[in-house]
Amino acid sequence: MKILVIGSGGREHALCHALRRTSQRRIELYCAPGSDAIGEMAHTVPASATDVAALASFAETERIALTIVGGEAPLAAGLADEFERRGLVVAGPRAEAAQLESSKAFAKEFMARHRIPTARFRVAASAGEAREILLGGEFGGADAPVVVKADGLAGGKGVVVAATRAEALQAVGELMEGGRVGSDAARRVVIEEALTGAEASLLFWTDGTHYALMPPARDHKRIGEGDTGPNTGGMGAITAPGVLDEETQGNAVRKVVEPTLAGLRADGLEFRGVIFVGLMLTPEGARVLEYNVRFGDPEAQAILVRLESDLGEIFEAVATKNLRDARVEWTEDASACVVLAARGYPERPETGARIEGLDGAQKSSSVQIFHAGTKRAADGSWRTAGGRVVGVTTRAPTLERALAHCYEAAGHIHWDGMQYRRDIGRFGKQ
Ligand code: AMP
Ligand code: GLY
C-alpha cells in the first residue's frame, strides 16, 4: 500500500515514523517534500506542500492509495478538494471546512451559531472599526486585558493578548496597518474577551460522523522558561493524565467535540481528518480558544509515540468514512517532546551549525529524535536548517520519567547556539 505524507517538519517525521512502526501491512511510504531525515524512512518527492496540482498528479501517476496532510497550508490551498476531484483518497478537510483554522472570524461565527463555548467576541473589518469596538467599553475599561487576533493564517504571530486597552490599540495598528502579519491575514481582526486558566489541546480524528479521541496534550508556546518571551511554533509538548481530568474531558466532549461535528454537518461541511481543539479551562468550564484542522507540531510527536494501533488504517478509515470500525488504542502511560531550537529562534534563527551527538542520544536511551529543521551536509554530518531543529520524544510510565529520558538524551546533543526549555511539562498553564 502506497501512502503519501504532505509536509517536511518534525510532525511529518513523527507521522512517517508512526506509520512505519504501527503498520500491520507492507507499506511504501512517500513524503512531499520531506527532509533528509524523513528520506531515511520514506521516498521524498520534490514538490512543494502547497503545489496542489503537482501533488495530485504525482499521486495519480504513482497510484498512491492514501494521502495524509500534515499542515494547514496545503488544506487551505485546496489540496483535499483537488485530490477528491480526481478520485484520490485523502485524509484532510476541503478548503471550506479548513476555514475553521484559516479564518478566526469563520471559526468564531461557527461557534456562536452552534453554541460552542468560546470567549465573547466581535469581528472588525477595518482598523477604524476595531478602535471603535475597543474604545466602546464592551470589553472593559482602559486597564482591562483584551485579545486581538488577525483573522487569517499568521504562523503564530497573529494573536496579541493585550494587558491594557493601549496595548490592544497598538496591536490593531501593527496587525492591520503595520505589516506584522501578511496583509491578507489581517484584513479583519477578531477582538475577544481575555480568559484565564490552564490550557489543554484535545485532538481527535473524525470521518464526519464518528470520532476517535487522542490523549489530551499540552504544548509550551513561549520561547523562554516560565512561559516568557515571544511565541513560537511550540517548544515542547506532553501528554499525561493531569492535562485534562476525566470529568473535564467528558464535558469538553459533550459541549465542544460533539457540537462541533453536529455543527459541521448542519452547515454542510464534510470533515474527514484531524480536529485540534485548543481549550482554556476557565472557572466557568472549558472554552475553545482555537481550532486547528490538523495535528499540532510538536503535539503530534508526543501523541503518536503512544499509539498502539495501525496509523495507516486509522487514516484510511477517516478518509473512507469507516472510523467506527477502526481500532484506536493508546498506551496507558505519559509522553514528552522537548524541542531543541537554534539561536535566534523565533525571530531570526541561525542555520548551518554542525549538530553533534544525535547518534549517541538515540542509542543511550529510549527516545526518538524527530527532525524539524536539519540537513545532511556533503560530509554526512547533520546541520541546523530551521528554527526548531529536533524534537526529543519518548513515552514512559510517568511524565517525570518521560521528561528525564528526554533531558538525558538532550544532554548528548550539541551545536553552537542550541537552546531549549528545561521546564517542559513542569511550568505554566497548569
Ligand atoms: P490561538 O492561536 O487563538 O490559540 O491563540 C494563541 C494563544 O493565545 C493561546 O494558546 C492562548 O495562550 C492565548 N489566547 C488566545 N485567545 C485567548 C483569550 N481569549 N484569552 C486569553 N488568552 C488567549
Ligand atoms: N503547537 C501548536 C500548533 O501546531 O499549532
Image (cartoon, rainbow, N blue to C red):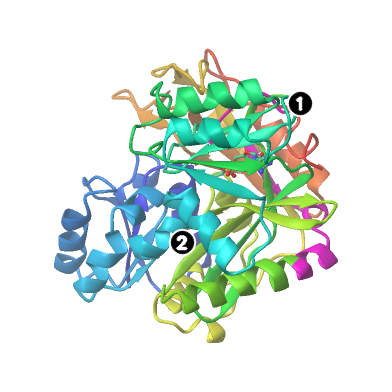
Image quadrant holding the N terminus, namely bottom left
Most foreground residue, 412 or 122: 122
Q: Toward the viewer: 37 or 161? A: 161
Instruction: Give the residue drawn at x 53%, y 73%.
Output: 263
Q: In this view, does 8 lie above or below 291?
A: above
Give the residue number, with chain letter if any, for mark 2. 20
Describe the element under mark 2 as helix, strand or loop: helix
Residue in the picture at 79% in, 44% down: 197
**Quadrant field for ligand 2:** top right
Observer-nearest residue: 420 or 355? 420
Magenta residue check for 41: no
The mark nearer the N terminus, 2 or 1, is 2
Residue 419: x percent and y percent? 60, 20
Q: Name the residue under label 1.
A: 226
Give the alpha-carbon distance from disc 2 to disc 1, as whole Å.
Answer: 36 Å
Kind of residue at badge 2 = Arg
> Residue 347, position in %: x, y?
48, 19
Residue 36: image location, x then y, percent: 35, 38
The magenta stretch spans which residues? 227-251
Q: Which amino acid does label 1 sit on?
A: Gly
